[in-house]
Amino acid sequence: MQWLFLVLAGLLEVCWAVGLKYSHGFTKLVPSMFTILGMIASFYFLSLALRHLPLGTAYAIWTGIGTVGTVILGIILFKESIDPIRLICIGFIIIGIVGLKIVSAH
């Protein structure tokens, strides 16, 4: 169950990171509210995952999911660069996430 909490926390991190872009520096009410709620929910589920997972592993995976998801949505929603070297670097992050999951004792 802790891995499900961690993945959910990571996906919510993507939501609030994208929400930051839409909130325009917290000047737009509705996107700002969703962003803050996403932050709270993301930290909550991360805290549940941390009950049973090692801090370093959980934090790295949480931020990795957030990073990869945010880059993907940045490409889709905001037409950000899809430079091959950028995508290779994202691939390394994904390899790191999978590697941490594989070597985790939990």
Image: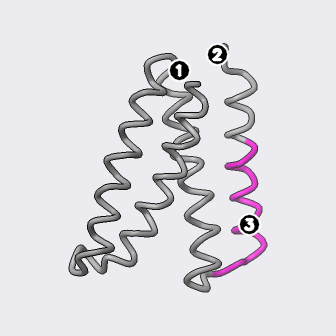
The disc, 2 or 1, on the residue closer to the chain's N-terminal end is 1
Cα separation, mark 1 vs mark 3, equals: 29 Å
| For discs 1 and 3, the disc positioned in front in the rendered view | 1
Magenta residues, start to end: 81-95
Amino acid under disc 1: Leu
Amino acid under disc 3: Leu
Evaluate if marks 1 and 3 touch, with contact meaning CB atoms under 8 Å apart: no
The disc, 2 or 3, on the residue closer to the chain's N-terminal end is 3
Which label number is shown at residue 53?
A: 1
Evaluate if marks 2 and 3 touch, with contact meaning CB atoms under 8 Å apart: no
Residue at image x 54%, y 35%?
6
Left or right of residue 98: residue 7: left
Give the residue at mark 3.
Answer: 87
**37 drawn magenta:** no
Quarter occupied by residue 21? bottom left
Residue at image x 74%, y 33%?
99
Q: Secondary structure at mark 3?
A: helix
In this figure, what is the number of numbered marks? 3
Residue at image x 39%, y 30%?
47
User: Which quarter of the figure is the C terminus placed in?
Assistant: top right
Which label number is shown at residue 106?
A: 2
Mark 3 crowdedness (10 Å alpha carbons): few <14, some 14-19, many ≥20: some
Q: Secondary structure at mark 1?
A: loop
Which label number is shown at residue 5?
A: none
Cα separation, mark 2 vs mark 1, equals: 7 Å
Majority secondary structure in the magenta region? helix
Quarter occupied by residue 86? bottom right
Q: Secondary structure at mark 2?
A: loop
Residue 17, position as x, y percentages in the image: 43, 63
Residue 1, position as x, y percentages in the image: 59, 25
Evaluate if marks 2 and 1 touch, with contact meaning CB atoms under 8 Å apart: yes
